[in-house]
Amino acid sequence: IAGITQAPTSQILAAGRRMTLRCTQDMRHNAMYWYRQDLGLGLRLIHYSNTAGTTGKGEVPDGYSVSRANTDDFPLTLASAVPSQTSVYFCASSTGPLSGANVLTFGAGSRLTVL
Amino acid sequence: GQNIDQPTEMTATEGAIVQINCTYQTSGFNGLFWYQQHAGEAPTFLSYNVLDGLEEKGRFSSFLSRSKGYSYLLLKELQMKDSASYLCAVSDSNYQLIWGAGTKLIIKP
């Protein structure tokens, strides 16, 4: 079934630990995104990639890094987790921002708790 | 700054009609999106408006007025499964999506 797979589904980790959230899509979409969703706030863009080999910073990039070595994969790394990074993380993909209606397809989300 | 406003929560009765409003102030405009998000799940696409007017899709319709910076999502013949959060998002001049905080819709029997 075509779509986006995120892993892990949920994770509890200690502050200061390194963590990578995985995201894979099989729709051959050019663009991929990482968002965080916190109660009472809209989705906030962390990082994005409009095409393989390129990445850009979103609204809240500090403490996070990404890479886009190929079309399908877009991992998000927290180098040294802090409690304020406790959130639900959504990976999304689309055909690209210049392709008319840039409809995003979202993964199921990764719930991260940093203690 | 850029801003999307929508009500935090609304309640409606099964079988009725509900209108969820969204007002926006953004640097440029390249379309407005509505997404549905059930609790604990991912957002899913509902509608896209780039020109003024009404777009109808089954029980759901979405309206846009660019001059007023205003949109609404109209849900008819409400069903219990429509209980969800509805997210409004605007594509700005850089084609980046600006998201509202979402409107939680509670449907009562």
Image (tube, coloured by chain):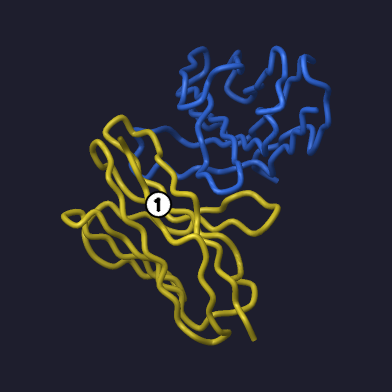
Between B74 and A11, the residue placed more toward the observer is A11
User: According to the colouring, which chain is yellow?
Assistant: B
Q: How crowded is mark 1: few (under 14 residues within 10 Å), some or many (20 or more)?
A: many
Count of picture labels = 1
Between A11 and A8, the residue placed more toward the observer is A11
Seen in the image, is B86 located left or right of residue B107? left
Seen in the image, is B24 located left or right of residue B77? left
Looking at the picture, does residue A42 appear above or below residue A21?
below
Q: In which quarter of the image is residue A83?
A: top right
Q: Which residue lies furthest to the left in this view?
A: B67
Q: Where is residue B50 in the image (x, y as percent from the top left)?
A: 27, 51
- Residue located beneath label 1 in the image: B33
Q: In which quarter of the image is the N terminus of chain B?
A: top left
Q: Position of residue B91 (x, y in %)?
A: 34, 41
User: According to the colouring, which chain is blue?
Assistant: A
Q: In which quarter of the image is residue B49?
A: bottom left
| Point 48% across, 54% down: residue | B87
What's under tag 1, amino acid-wise?
A: Phe
| Point 56% across, 60% down: residue | B85
Q: In which quarter of the image is residue A84?
A: top right
Seen in the image, is A77 located left or right of residue A60? right
Seen in the image, is A51 located left or right of residue A1? left
Secondary structure at numbered mark 1: strand
The chain letter for the residue carrying disc 1 is B
Q: Where is residue A104 in the image (x, y as percent from the top left)?
A: 50, 42
Looking at the picture, does residue B92 appear above or below residue B75?
above
